[in-house]
Image (spheres, rainbow, N blue to C red):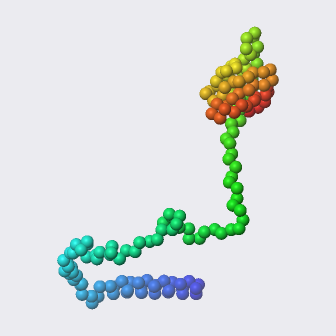
Amino acid sequence: MKRRAVLLAALAASLLAAWWASGLEGEGEAPVVRRPAAKAPRRDAASSRPDLSALAVPRPVPAGGDAVGDLFPVRSFRPPPPPPAVVRPTAPPLPFRHGGLLEDGGPPAAFLAEGDRLHVVRVGDVVDGRYRVSAVHRGRIDLVYLPLNQTQSLVSGALP
């Protein structure tokens, strides 16, 4: 209970001090009148700056022709590393599944499943403008990936 009384007294003292301080603002102050300063005559910017072009010193250019040069060249007694090997692009994995083979007396036809589409192809056919059928055998179909001219084989029953 004693603690509550002390807190209430401190709150009342704070409120009284804030109210008293707010009443002090504006007492005894004369209003300040501000006059704009007189403007100086404006000078042309080009005429106010001196011409310093005669003082310019030409910068030396290093022997390599680079204007800045290499400030911190690397110095090593080791031989430089070999250049990275060129990685030839490879064809993506075949998107087809072998669906079967049809031998009806003529050239054999193969069934290729791509997702929900079924392609019936013979030797020389182009599938989706990306693959050309180069050979159809009983257990294998050879396809050429046209953008890279790489041959890939699809074995009967293999998944893509």
Question: Which residue appears farthest toward the bottom when viewing the image?
Answer: 28
Name the residue rendered at 74%, 26% in the picture.
142
- In this rendering, the answer to whether 115 lies above or below 2 is above
Q: How many marks?
A: 0
Which x, y percent locates residue 147? 63, 33
Can you see residue 115?
no
Quarter occupied by the N terminus: bottom right
Which x, y percent locates residue 13? 46, 87
Which is more toward the observer, 65 or 28?
65
Which is more toward the observer, 84 or 64?
64
Q: Is residue 147 left or right of residue 29?
A: right
- In this rendering, the answer to whether 73 lies above or below 128 is below
Which is more toward the observer, 83 or 5?
83
Q: Quadrant of residue 40?
A: bottom left
Which x, y percent locates residue 133? 69, 24
Which x, y percent locates residue 111? 72, 21
Name the residue rendered at 65%, 69% in the picture.
75
Name the residue rendered at 41%, 72% in the picture.
58
Q: Quadrant of residue 76?
A: bottom right
Q: Is residue 154 left or right of residue 72?
A: right
Can you see residue 135?
yes
Q: Quadrant of residue 20?
A: bottom left
Q: Is residue 27 left or right of residue 18?
A: left
Quarter occupied by the C terminus: top right
